[in-house]
Image (tube, helix red, strand yellow):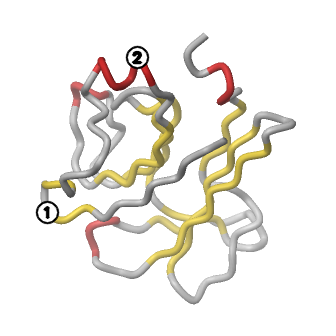
Amino acid sequence: MVDVVLKSYSGNKFGQDVVDLSNNEYLNNYCVVAVEFDTLQNREFDDINNSHVGIDINGLKSVIAKPAGYYTSNEKSFNNFTLASGQPMQVWVDYDYVDKHMNVKMALMHVAKPDRPLLSLVYDLSSCHQ
């Protein structure tokens, strides 16, 4: 079973009921998978820039991260955008439990779902604590 929690971020503060990924006691008992939309570059967490998307597993360092943006439908062109711009965006997160494959796709609102993912990761989430 997978529980999915989506929370909003405002300024520099999360809501009170958001999982604290810096809490090692919590991470020892649960498998936490997060798609991170980061508007700050923090060297402590090896952030790539100040507008990136990452997949975090049991911690604040991304397993994989890319600058925010999306590929056009022909997959030849990458459209970069700034997360802090205020432009509405949409995100699709797919996980195939048979192939252990996660894809994250994003685009600005009113843009069709891209064929090519921004992030693609093979990871067996059932072995998160093994």
The residue positioned 72% from the left and 63% from the top of the image is: 76
User: Which one is in front, 16 or 52?
Assistant: 16
For this view, does 98 lie left or right of residue 6?
Answer: right
Considering only vertical position in the picture, is 20 above or below 28? below
Residue density around tag 1, few if under 14, some if 14–19, many if 20 or more, within 10 Å: few
Considering only vertical position in the picture, is 62 above or below 73? above
User: Which one is in front, 77 or 29?
Assistant: 29
Instruction: Work out which quarter of the rendered image holds the N terminus and state it.
Output: top right
Residue density around tag 2, few if under 14, some if 14–19, many if 20 or more, within 10 Å: few
The residue positioned 65% from the left and 30% from the top of the image is: 125
Considering only vertical position in the picture, is 91 above or below 118? below
Which residue is farthest top?
130
Instruction: Work out which quarter of the rendered image holds the C terminus and state it.
Output: top right
The three-letter amino acid code for the residue at tag 1 is Gly
> N-terminal of the two: label 2 or label 1?
1
For this view, does 90 lie left or right of residue 22?
Answer: right
Q: Secondary structure at mark 1?
A: loop
The three-letter amino acid code for the residue at tag 2 is Asn
Mark number displayed over residue 11: 1
For this view, does 115 lie left or right of residue 84?
Answer: right
The residue positioned 62% from the left and 57% from the top of the image is: 93
Q: Secondary structure at mark 2?
A: helix
Tell me the CA gap for discs 2 and 1. 29 Å
Which residue is farthest right?
98
Asked where in the image residue 46 lies, by quadrant, the reply is top left
Asked where in the image residue 9 lies, by quadrant, the reply is bottom left
Give how far across and how far down residue 89 sits, in percent. Answer: 46, 76
Residue that badge 2 annotates:
28
